[in-house]
Image (tube, grey):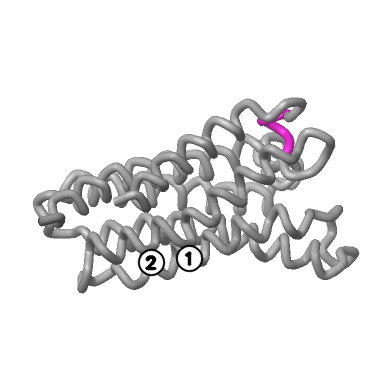
Amino acid sequence: MARAYAGIFASALFLGMTTVRAGHDPVRQTISEWLVGPNALPVQVTFLIYGLTLLAAVSSSVAAALPGRRGTTATVALAITLGLGCVSLPLLPPEAWPPSSMRWPGVVHLIAAAVLFTGMPAMCFSLARATAGLPAWRRMSRVSAVVGALCAAVLIGGVIDLSINPGGFSATHLGLVERAEVELFVAWQGVLSLNLVAALHRRTP
């Protein structure tokens, strides 16, 4: 049960810390830029805590609450993958664009960020599949599908806009676009953890 509560705590910590990041422009600066600079340590620690929570607590809670369901294995695997991505970002600092000029830590950081942005909607969709048809999870299943669609829309829309209009909205508001997807996902994960607490409580004799 404690592992499910850990997911609630980590979600609240992440949303709180990344919102009050001192000296950060939430509209223009990217999430990777949260992790560098003189005031970056609290955010780095937050990413590590959140990543380890996804890696261990959230993944194991999903496996325990939804055993044998189609989609559970994928959800667990995605939680572990996203957790590893969150842990790697503060350990491998970002480097200046373009990728051809980066050393290997910057390239790995870029790959980890790409995995995170694509994995977030995928985890929402896989959880929706794992909970489909379960009366106690009906609302969460629908919420997961909607949040997954919104995260995917933000990601795909941002990529398309950057590709066809390099100086457009997504380029000048990249931090806002990234935050929209990340914070939507983290809030969803907090709600998921609340549901996991209830589900594990029902399974406790």
Q: Is residue 36 above or below residue 103?
A: above
Q: CA distance from mark 1 to mark 2?
A: 6 Å
Residue under the image location 36 percent in, 63 percent down = 60
- Pick the quarter of the image with the C terminus: bottom left
**Residue at (48, 65) in percent of width and height:** 80
What residue is rendered at 73% in x and 30% in y? 24
131 or 91: nearer the viewer = 91
Q: Is residue 64 left or right of residue 133?
A: right
Q: For this rendering, which residue is in front, 200 or 97?
A: 200
Amino acid carrying mark 1 in the image = Ile
Point out residue 69 in the picture as x, y percentages from the top left corner.
21, 70
- Please name the residue that numbered disc 2 is placed on: 76
Residue 156 is labelled as none
| Secondary structure category for the residue under label 2 | helix
Does the residue at mark 1 contact the one at mark 2 (Cβ under 8 Å)?
Answer: yes
What number of labels is visible? 2
Q: Position of residue 193 (x, y in %)?
A: 33, 47
User: Was residue 28 drawn as part of the magenta stretch in this picture?
Assistant: yes
Mark 2: amino acid: Val
Query: Dot 2: few (<14), some (14–19), or many (≥20) neighbours within 10 Å?
Result: many
Image coordinates for residue 134, horizontal then vertical, percent: 12, 57
Q: Which portion, as a residue range, is magenta?
A: 25-29
Q: Which residue is mark 1?
A: 80
